[in-house]
Image (cartoon, rainbow, N blue to C red):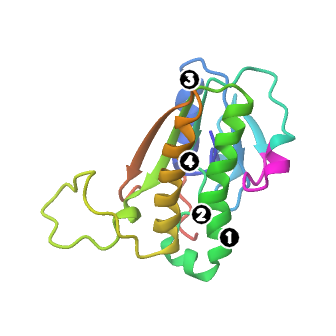
Amino acid sequence: VTGGAGFIGSALAKRLIEKGNKVYILDDLSTGFKSNIPAGGVFYKVDISNKKRLFDLYFPDKVDGVFHLAAQPSSEASFDDPDRDIDVNYKATYNILEFCRMHDCKRFIYASSMSVYGDVKDSKGAIPENYPCEPVSYYGANKLASEKIIKVYVKKTEIKETIFRLFNVYGPGQNMFN
């Protein structure tokens, strides 16, 4: 679980552990908290946008699937440091896909964002998946670009992908200051 020290990633990791899975948690702790990491998880403090650091990690077990939740999670922050947003929200996604290929991992689940849609006009409730994507931030643009690179990447491999777009997520363990 990338981003496994964040409030969504840690809740997912905890549930996976409860179900009897061996869970590796990768997080750089830039927005997550070490205290969120559930007991039983194997934690690696790593910036996954750094390919060398990521590929140097040792995994004694076969990696069956990756939940990629790591992100710089703020549209506003993406304007403050666009280069960092590209590294964390786009480049890291490609690196994790390469990691999956290297480890013969067949499942890749990606947490995208409602920000790929941009400013939705005249919404009367649910937004269909085929609604036009017109991001208005680097964050939204990088999340959409990551969706596209995933679609291209999996065509050349045996990796099966699932992409979901989160809308207004909040809960225990969330870092309200990043």
Question: What residue is rendered at 68% in x and 63% in y?
Answer: 87
Q: CA distance from mark 1 to mark 4?
A: 16 Å
Looking at the image, residue 41 lies above or below residue 167: above
Percent from the top left, x then y, of residue 45?
Answer: 79, 48
> Can you tell which mark lies on residue 18?
3
| Tag in front: 1 or 4 | 1
- Queried whether the magenta region covers residue 106, the answer comes back as no
Looking at the image, residue 145 lies above or below residue 1: below
Q: Residues within 10 Å of mark 4 (few under 14, many from 20)?
A: many
Give amino acid for label 2.
Gln
Q: Which residue is mark 2?
A: 72
- Queried whether the magenta region covers residue 47, the answer comes back as yes
Percent from the top left, x then y, of residue 99?
Answer: 71, 38
Q: CA distance from mark 2 to mark 3?
A: 27 Å
- Along the polypeptide, which appears first: circle 4 or circle 3? 3
Q: Which residue is mark 4?
A: 69
Q: CA distance from mark 4 to mark 3?
A: 19 Å
The residue furthest front is 156
Give amino acid for label 3.
Glu
Percent from the top left, x then y, of residue 51?
Answer: 79, 50
Classify mark 1: helix, strand or loop: helix
Instruction: Tell which of 130 and 62 is nearer to you.
Output: 130
Q: Which residue is mark 1?
A: 84
